[in-house]
Amino acid sequence: MTERPNPLLIANTIDEALDAVSRGSTPIAGGTDLVVGARQGNKRLPASLVAIDRVEELQSIGLDSDGSLSIGSGVTHATLMSSTVVVTNYTALADAAALIGSPATRNVGTIGGNVMNGSPAMDTGAPLAVFDAMIQLSTVAGNRQITTSELWVAPGQTSAEPDELCTAIIIAPQPDRSGSAYVRLEYRRSMEIAVVGAAAVVTLGLDGTIAGCRIALTAVAPTIVLVDGLESLIGQAIGEATLATVADLASSQAAPISDLRASEQYRSHSVGVMAKRAVLAAARRATGESISVPVNRSIGVGSDGQRQWEAGAS
Amino acid sequence: MTIDEQGSESESIGYDLHVNGQTYPVEATLDRNLLGVLRTEIGLTGTKEGCDDCECGACMVLLDGQPVNSCSYLAAQAQGRQITTIEGLGNADQLHPLQECLLAHGGVQCGFCTPGMIISAHALLERNSSPSRDEVGIGLSGNLCRCTGYAKIIDAVLDSASNGSVEPTP
Amino acid sequence: MTSGLTSRNGVRNENYLNLKAVTLEPRPFPRADGPDKVTGTGRYAADMVLPGMAFARFKYAEISHARIVRLDTSKAESLPGVVAVITATDVPDVRYSPGVADRTLFATDAVRFEGEILAAVAATTEALAQAAVDAIEVEYEQLPTVTDVVQAIAPGAPLVHPDWQNYEVSAETEQRPNVASFSSIAHGDAEAGMARAATVVTSRYVADASHASPIEPRAILAQWEGRKLTVWSATQVPFDARAGVCETLDLPTNQVRIIVPHLGGGFGGKCGFHFEAHIAALARAAGRPVKLVFSRKEEFLAPDRRREGMVVELTTGLNADGTIAARTGTLLIDNGAYTADAAFFPQLAAMLAAGPYRIPALKIEASLVYTNHQPSGSVRAPTAPQACWAIESHTDELAATVGMAPVEFRRLNGLRSGDVGPVGQTYGEIGLQACIDSVASRLTGETGTEADEAIGLAVGWWPSFPGPSGAYIKIDSDGAGQIITGAQECGTGAVMTLRQLAADELGMAAEDFELVYQDTGVAPYDTGATGSQTLFNNGRAVLLAASELADQIRQLAADHLEAAPSDIVLSDGHASVAGSPNPAVSVAELAATAAGAELLIAHGSGKPGEYPETVGASCVGDQGVAAWASPQFSCHGVRVRLDSETGVVRVLNVATCHDSGTILNPLGALGQVEGGVLMGIGQALTEGTQYDEDGCQRNPGLLEYKLQTAADAPTITTQFVETTGGQGPHGAKGLAEAPNVATAAAISNALAKLIGSHVTQLPMTPERVWATMTDATPSDADRDATGHDTSEPKSGDEL
Ligand SMILES: Cc1cc2nc3c(=O)[nH]c(=O)nc-3n(C[C@H](O)[C@H](O)[C@H](O)COP(=O)(O)OP(=O)(O)OC[C@H]3O[C@@H](n4cnc5c(N)ncnc54)[C@H](O)[C@@H]3O)c2cc1C
Ligand code: FES
Ligand code: FES
């Protein structure tokens, strides 16, 4: 019989996980992409896996000495959506985590798995992109950090090497008077995959006008798209005209496909709607207003918040 | 569905699973899902398969008290954890309060979604002992039911919550 | 039933004046199968195992129309672990299907839809069976596909069944090229009526196909012992399944036993005879038991059961006073590649398109059109949700045209007790108007609707299906009762309610009875969990058996108490003489006496209720469902909210009211209504099968075919109008399908108020809603024309 690597190693430390990865094992965290994909026959289950869901070092959310937020790759969506620091300072990420799948999916699915799976419809992607997050990739030899746009190269494909493990996601502190939000279009109120989505982080000046704005879009291109040309918003007040500009910019930079879930035209249109809603919610959060996570359910269609939303828009 | 094209040729691995307070030695290939091993090797068929796709929730079990779609979870990855299936929550002589409430409210029709639904409801009430109606809806949203329209299931869970009926899992 | 008291001109029969909807207090309903189901100990078909059993997989066509040039199973047969491979040549050459015998177990010369079975394999593991399936070689010559019902009936269209004229058809079936079954209903002179009408409105609505999607995928296990075959199957209709096995494998009924373990829902998806014969034939070839468990994808692709797509064209002429003068309609129903049980669909759909309205002149033509899609078959109220959605959307258009509120238009034109319906059937007491009143008052009684919300309602109707049915009841020496019934429990609680019916008749408690059911080997015939008929028909059988048994007990008690049998009353598990509760003798004691002498056994069947006559109407292709036995009526109203920028719609609350005659089990009835409403919301908004240009399904999975989740569930309030005259036990009518008729239509009407016109495609997906809004952004003038004056912010709040 040929020598085969152990089919499943259960790592308890980062070192054990890195060692296994260096020997050709594929990491499995919650398995909600990996196992589902394999059972559907999309991708074969790798012959050797290393389970990283018991590595405690990967499961913490903490502040680095420079004030950056460091999220272990093994942090689950359930943890992420209820983490005070994430909900307070990086709300868009909590919005996204809270929308993923069902309670069971959120309970085992991890941010590391979401990021490394690299789907263009991934929900944490747009928030991470607007926060300029750095993805920390580690090998037995050491660490490197890359941006999200360096990581995601094509649908389901990342630039990480096979022996690299994502160990953390690092996000620099946001300027004062910043707020963020992630909104996605969904046909049901749960168990959805983003038809399109948009994240925004908005920083307000002391006069209440826009001092900074970043927007990223989900499921409208092979990878997450950062919207260009937002400089024109600087100094503008949040209002109908600004939001219309946001919607136009987002729609025009979307390059979606038509598929089962939506046509290209509808995606282009609705991503603009999502973008402007994300900007509005982010701006309102920037003023200190508390809009509960996820925005989709607190201001989405069918919730009573929707009207306050519309009131805020006009 | 076969995952590993070698099918039965791939090597079995041996491990223990702790299910409902009992330990079961298992020999199975890596590709086997927890649902299949529970139903076939361990013989606990209360957990159901509705889609094998993480979409219906009929296969829901608790892993260390938290809900997991066992159809899409590798059995081998569950080793060392406490697994609770519907059979671990109550029996005909002593129904779990959630089971009683579901029956009393008419939340059971064909019953195929019921084990998974009870597992998710249990996890929800452990997380949040007095959920709102909407929170129950979101909490059960990974469990499809085609028969009831959910209203009576949600009523039952709310009733169960108001009686403070969920104790921590063993 | 009334006679001579009809009131076509709106004068209500005074006997019917007091009909009122009521909210029913649920009576405790201890389900006999409840503990099994909540504890996970109940066995479903997929849970069954037998020693030595092999696993089955099917080789599917995976192409929607082709001639089979070569089919080679030799490689598959030689693979390790493979115990049987069978094809058409291994089973009798039988064409079957009620109405039109166009079906074979395995493809012979051609395949006509992607899920058609070419071969079946049994192997010692599922993986090996799949490997063998993958090793089967097939060569095709592709044939032109027919995927559109309109093109299918155009002259010169390629034929799905070139041999159609040679198929055996029932006497009633009217065939045409690419039309499996045609029906028309005509009453009065529709053309003349239309010519005289003050206004004429024409609408066209198109519904996509959808699916029953029970949460349990089907599973079958077959075992031969000598010449006797036992099949455990997840079927709603064990006796139909038996008939199918006997017909296709040429076996007598007494050698075939179908047992249904607990059934995980059906909704019609598990009606009809499906794969039992394939697995039985495999088991025979393999010389061992064989088990089949479907994946969710197979559940979508393979069964002859899909809710049919439909194109509905309706024209209605109105008189100046808003009454309907005449209606014509054309319905094209997508039959798919084979006819399953759909031959009667055109007539049903035609009745649905007429609607529960007073229409003096009517002509509706409906065709069941062959395509290279998966076959259609009875899914919960076949044809009704789509046809009702079309007709009731059209009805709101009519109301708008004459400037009437939708609810007033329905009050004016809707059927009343004693009226004569579209085929000349005279109705007795019917609750349609009371249903409308009930829903309208609950919906409008709520506080004001916001600008993004609207309310809408729709009415529906649906027949009950009288049929033969049987049951036995016995009481053993310890006083424990057993009901042995041919009926099938699919979750509705219909069989579970039989205990209560028997117990009430015998003065005992429901818990005193155990049920033996869904086993063709032990119980008399019943049609199965289909057509909402279980309590309606089997309830009659159980009541008869129970009353016969009550007579036997009274006779025993009379001897014991020295009284006349007619003076004995049965209550609380005891028999006593009327008027003097003491002395009393327990049923258990009497049963012990009987155990040593003449046993306590009774049987019931009884004559099924009769179908009413059609009078003064002509029905071409009459399949016997134009005049409706124990007709049921309903009204559903909804409040929806629209995200006008994206077209996403949410149903916030639902008010329903049903006339299903006497409600035997309120808790069970509410469960049927609520489940039907959620299914209707799915059909309205998210559930639609998409096809590629070759006729293959693009979304055969639960991620892309979206059922409603618990997070989407609205609040639902329900009332019942308990009319008299139902032919079921104690005046009951059917119930399980009726709640799946009017919901999508009500949503359509509410939505139309918000966007100014109806969305003409079902499901009304966000993208279709958005497209309707952007294509035809209605000007204010348009809105006036449709009668929905949006200048007034609260217009959505009016019915
Ligand atoms: C029912 C259902 C609903 C879902 N809904 C959503 C949704 O709404 N939004 C959404 O974005 N996603 C959704 N998903 C997808 C999935 O749940 C998420 O992407 C999840 O975050 C994946 O995490 P995981 O831990 O389960 O990943 P795994 O499946 O364990 O891993 C995914 C991939 O990443 C690799 N990987 C995992 N961790 C690391 C690491 N630390 N370093 C390097 N590589 C790693 C694995 O090798 C694998 O290739 C859904 C999935 C299901 C089954
Ligand atoms: S079987 Fe696991 S979610 Fe459906
Ligand atoms: S009770 Fe049948 S699916 Fe829920």
Image (cartoon, coloured by chain):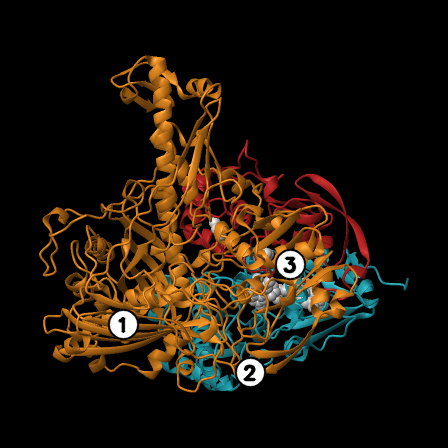
Q: Nearer the viewer, residue B44 or C66?
A: C66
In the picture, measured across the screen, residue C277 lies left or right of residue C738, that is right
Q: Which residue is mark 3?
A: B72
Q: Which quadrant of the render holds ligand 2? A: bottom right
Q: CA distance from mark 1 to mark 3?
A: 50 Å
Where residue C668 appears, x then y in whole percent?
38, 45
Chain for numbered disc 3: B
In the picture, measured across the screen, residue B85 lies left or right of residue C544, that is right
Q: Which residue is mark 2?
A: C143
Please name which of the two marks, 1 or 3, marks the residue nearer to the observer: 1
Q: Nearer the viewer, residue C459 or C479?
A: C479
Q: Tell whether label 3 touches label 1 (CB within 8 Å).
A: no
Q: Considering the numbered disc 2 on the image, is that residue within a helix, a strand or a loop? A: loop
Chain for numbered disc 2: C
| In the depicted structure, whether residue C755 falls above or below residue C385 | below
Q: Considering the numbered disc 1 on the image, is that residue within a helix, a strand or a loop? A: strand
Please name which of the two marks, 2 or 3, marks the residue nearer to the observer: 2
Where residue C335 appears, x then y in whole percent?
44, 71
Q: Tell whether label 2 touches label 1 (CB within 8 Å).
A: no
Give me the chain that's cyan. Answer: A
Q: Which residue is mark 1?
A: C364
Q: Mark 2 packing: few (<14 Cα in 10 Å), some, or many (20+)? A: some
Where residue C129 appears, x then y in whole percent?
71, 62
Residue A70 in view in this figure: no
User: How many marks can you see?
Assistant: 3
Q: Which color is chain C depicted in?
A: orange
The answer to whether mark 3 is within 8 Å of ligand 1 is yes
| In the depicted structure, whether residue C765 falls above or below residue C270 | below
* Mark 1 or mark 2, earlier in chain: 2
Where residue A19 appears, x then y in whole percent?
83, 63
Give me the chain that's red. Answer: B
